[in-house]
Image: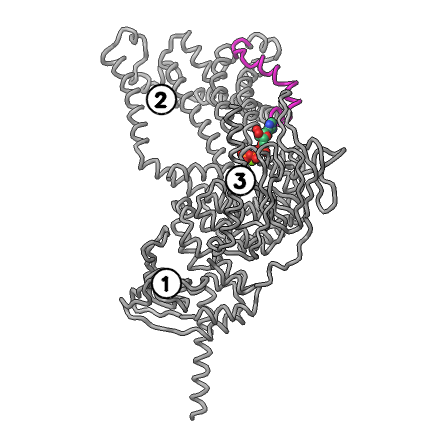
């Protein structure tokens, strides 16, 4: 839609990345509530390059969030290991990763603190860590919010703005900390398709400016193909990669690619693979319940 | 001579150019561009005048220029099928329109624009504009992303506007007219104006009139039942006029009216007891509740004890409290404190438990440590529940106070009611009761106001919910 933006800076994608390669190695996660073991992730291995947008799709309840939580450090893994830039986050002897500002999660239902204005939300990270003084953080936040077109909601509370705008504020809040990895857990699930399409372009815009590694869970295949460098299709529970698709459409992308031939071919390929897994999940659901 | 004229022409041109730069500086999103670039943009801009009623362009026409209004008013009407919350807008000095020219493969014009008055606009060729911006990629990037936001704001994302609109009617205009100078002032509604707004809203609703009717029915029933119909069970009751006269009398028959200093002593003693008990209950109950909610281990120690003591009614504590505490004052305060404390602690605990886990997770992600999460997530997150607890707490404080004062004490409204009964001063009973009602209401309103003050975010959320 706004290609003039790209014409001006064609070389933006080549900006250097700042690390953030994730290596998921043979991870197993068994939930064990009252002895009824649920195998959520089964020997899952996946390599994500620094600065890559890796889209994860898979049937509901297959264990995608579980994997994301393991990377973020919200819970432990049963076996296997996860490394970032060669450093072990969790693995043998250290079942749970430390949550930290190098890997920031953007939550499914949004987690802007409703009691802080958007600006106060955005400065939260650096102020808590003590990396910036409050005044410096406000300066930086203002700049980043202006770049994302958010300067007129600075003094609003999250409850006063639409969910689409909230997501953008949340992403800016994450980027304030110069993270290496952004972990998205279906952040756009609740949005209508119009807002969503705007959000995708806004996300790519932000990404071109800050090429961090992105681990992005979604149910929306079009979203996956439009945004991602790679799409990883997960099997039904227990979760492991079933098929990995390289989306060989060059970045920067705009909504034009949706109608391209290549996009439709990739879409077909994805739909087939996902449908197969969905059927399995459905069958099992019928049997179990 | 011709030399001089040339100079004048040159000077005039420079002045015009400067004027254009000033204008561009007031226009979103040109205001972020450096003067040097603005001068170059001003140089390619063409000044064009339009008569009233003259159409500047029709929908669907090829788009090449973008426009900045210099003077006059221009109507901007979107063509059918373009979604927007404001299909028709009026553009004034400093407003920018016609940005279809900046879009990819230049779609036709999306609107029809008509000059409403004699007006003047700047036309800037979009191609040349992009070329100029190209020379400074950083600025260009900002300008273009601003444009992008402005465009999406105007067309696609109407949800955004629909939600925020009620409180911010003026803000768009302000933002457009004054650049972004005002910071957040224009959108931030202060607590006072919000209170006024809600009060006006309240007056317009049927609620105050229903409230008035409610009170009238109660008072009317009292009046008629006692004084007019003289219903059997009401024969001993003090009547409305009797109570009213006694209350306002400079020389009350039974010794208590608004002119008697003792009346205020009773009120003051009761208020002081409630305030002390309430402060203690809050000071101990909130921290206890916070820790109960925060630490599972602490809860396992303390909560069972807490839950066993809680159902014991205040009156059952009377004998022990008299044995435990010396003097007349402390037992009364202790009894008043007890129920408030339970209410506060319990609600605070529930408040902590109600906080969405993703808030604390997000805080840890953003690098906060445990103490910071407690301070910045747990406490504010539990705040709405804490204040619900405090509302209940102040209510039960009055409730228990009267019970305690009836049992022991020398002063206080509960004491007044009780002794007036034994000494057959019936109107005084009612005076005590009504006074209690009014003061009790006032204190709980104060707690509510304090909550509103501390939780602006919540007030605003609720206000939005009420309007939409
Ligand atoms: N704390 C838990 N205790 C026990 N079982 C759990 C727990 N969390 C998740 N599970 C189970 O693990 C499986 C995977 O859950 P997960 O939330 O990772 O799925 P998901 O792929 O993110 O699903 P969705 O697409 O619906 O978000 C599910 O069957 C779920 O019931
Ligand atoms: Mg999930």
Vertical position of residue A112 compared to residue A211: above or below: above
Q: Mark 3 points at which residue?
A: A274
* Image quarter where ligand 1 lies: top right
Q: Is the magenta stretch mostly helix, strand or loop?
A: helix
* Magenta stretch in the rendered image: B291-316
Q: Is residue B305 magenta?
A: yes
Q: Is residue B370 magenta?
A: no
What is the basis of the colouring in this image? one colour
**On what subunit does the disc labeled 2 rest?**
B
Q: Mark 2 points at which residue?
A: B250
Which quarter of the rendered picture does the C terminus of chain B lie within? top left
Q: Name the residue under label 1.
A: B109
- Nearer mark to the viewer, of 2 and 3: 3
* Mark 1 element type: loop
Which quarter of the rendered picture does the N terminus of chain B lie within? bottom left
* Image-based side of B80 in relation to B410, left or right: left
Vertical position of residue A80 compared to residue B397: above or below: below
């Amino acid at each position: 839609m706004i290609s003039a933006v790209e014409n001006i800076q064609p070389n933006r994608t080549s900006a250097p990345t700042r690390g953030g390669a994730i290596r998921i190695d043979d991870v197993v996660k068994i939930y064990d509530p009252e002895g009824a073991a649920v195998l959520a992730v089964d020997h899952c291995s996946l390599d994500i390059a620094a600065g890559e947008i890796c889209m994860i799709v898979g049937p509901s309840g297959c264990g995608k969030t579980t994997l994301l939580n393991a990377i973020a450090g919200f819970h432990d893994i049963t076996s296997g290991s996860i490394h970032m830039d060669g450093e072990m986050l969790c693995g043998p002897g250290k079942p749970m990763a430390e949550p930290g500002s190098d890997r920031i999660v953007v939550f499914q239902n949004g987690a802007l603190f409703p009691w802080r204005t958007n600006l106060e939300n955005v400065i939260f990270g650096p102020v808590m860590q003590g990396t910036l003084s409050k005044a410096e953080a406000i300066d930086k936040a203002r700049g980043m919010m202006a770049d994302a077109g958010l300067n007129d909601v600075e003094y609003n509370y999250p409850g006063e703005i639409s969910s689409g705008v909230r997501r953008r504020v949340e992403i800016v809040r994450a980027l304030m900390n110069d993270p290496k990895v952004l972990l998205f857990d279906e952040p756009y699930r609740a949005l209508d398709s119009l807002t969503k399409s705007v959000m995708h372009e806004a996300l790519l815009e932000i990404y071109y400016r800050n090429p961090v590694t992105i681990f992005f869970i979604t149910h929306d295949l079009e979203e996956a193909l439009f945004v991602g460098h790679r799409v990883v299709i997960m099997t039904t529970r227990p979760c492991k990669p079933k098929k990995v698709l390289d989306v060989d459409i060059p970045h920067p992308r705009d909504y034009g690619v949706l109608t391209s031939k290549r996009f439709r071919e990739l879409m077909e390929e994805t739909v087939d693979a996902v449908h197969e897994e969905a059927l399995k999940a459905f069958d099992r659901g019928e049997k179990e319940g | 001579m011709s030399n001089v004229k040339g100079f004048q022409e040159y000077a005039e041109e420079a002045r015009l150019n400067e004027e254009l730069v000033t204008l561009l500086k007031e226009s979103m999103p040109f205001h972020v561009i450096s003067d040097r670039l603005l001068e170059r943009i001003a140089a390619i801009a063409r000044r064009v005048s339009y008569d009233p009623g003259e159409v500047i362009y029709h929908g669907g026409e090829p788009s090449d220029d973008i426009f900045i209004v210099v003077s006059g008013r221009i109507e901007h009407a979107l063509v059918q099928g373009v979604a927007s919350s404001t299909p028709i807008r009026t553009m004034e000095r400093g407003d920018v329109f016609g940005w279809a020219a900046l879009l990819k493969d230049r779609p036709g014009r999306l609107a029809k624009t008509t000059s409403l008055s004699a007006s003047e606009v700047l036309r800037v060729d979009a191609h040349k504009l992009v070329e100029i911006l190209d020379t400074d990629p950083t600025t260009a990037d900002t300008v273009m992303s601003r444009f992008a936001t402005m465009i999406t704001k105007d067309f696609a994302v109407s949800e955004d506007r629909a939600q925020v609109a009620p409180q911010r009617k003026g803000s768009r205009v302000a933002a457009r007219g004054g650049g972004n100078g005002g910071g957040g002032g224009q959108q931030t509604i202060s607590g006072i104006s919000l209170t006024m707004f809600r009060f006006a809203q309240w007056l317009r609703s049927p609620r105050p009139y229903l409230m008035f009717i409610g009170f009238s029915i109660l008072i009317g029933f009292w009046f008629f039942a006692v004084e007019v119909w003289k219903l059997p069970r009401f024969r001993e009751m003090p009547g409305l006029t009797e109570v009213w006269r006694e209350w306002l009398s400079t020389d009350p028959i039974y010794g208590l009216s608004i002119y008697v200093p003792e009346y205020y002593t009773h009120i003051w003693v009761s208020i002081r007891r409630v305030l002390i008990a309430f402060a203690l209950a809050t000071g101990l109950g909130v921290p206890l509740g916070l820790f109960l909610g925060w630490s599972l281990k602490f809860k396992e120690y303390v909560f069972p004890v807490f839950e066993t003591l809680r159902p014991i009614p205040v009156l059952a504590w009377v004998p022990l409290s008299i044995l435990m505490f010396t003097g007349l004052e402390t037992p009364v305060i202790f009894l008043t404190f007890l129920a408030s404390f339970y209410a506060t602690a319990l609600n605070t605990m529930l408040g902590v438990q109600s906080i969405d886990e993703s808030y604390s997770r997000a805080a840890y992600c953003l690098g906060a440590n445990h103490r910071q999460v407690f301070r910045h997530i747990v406490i504010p997150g539990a705040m709405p529940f804490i204040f619900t607890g405090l509302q209940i707490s102040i209510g039960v404080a009055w409730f228990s106070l009267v019970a305690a004062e009836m049992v022991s004490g020398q002063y206080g409204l509960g004491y007044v009611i009780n002794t007036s009964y034994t000494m057959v001063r019936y109107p005084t009973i009612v005076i005590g009761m009504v006074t209690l009602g009014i003061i009790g209401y006032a204190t709980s309103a104060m707690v509510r106001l304090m909550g509103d003050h501390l939780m602006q975010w919540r007030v605003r959320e609720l206000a939005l919910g009420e309007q939409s």
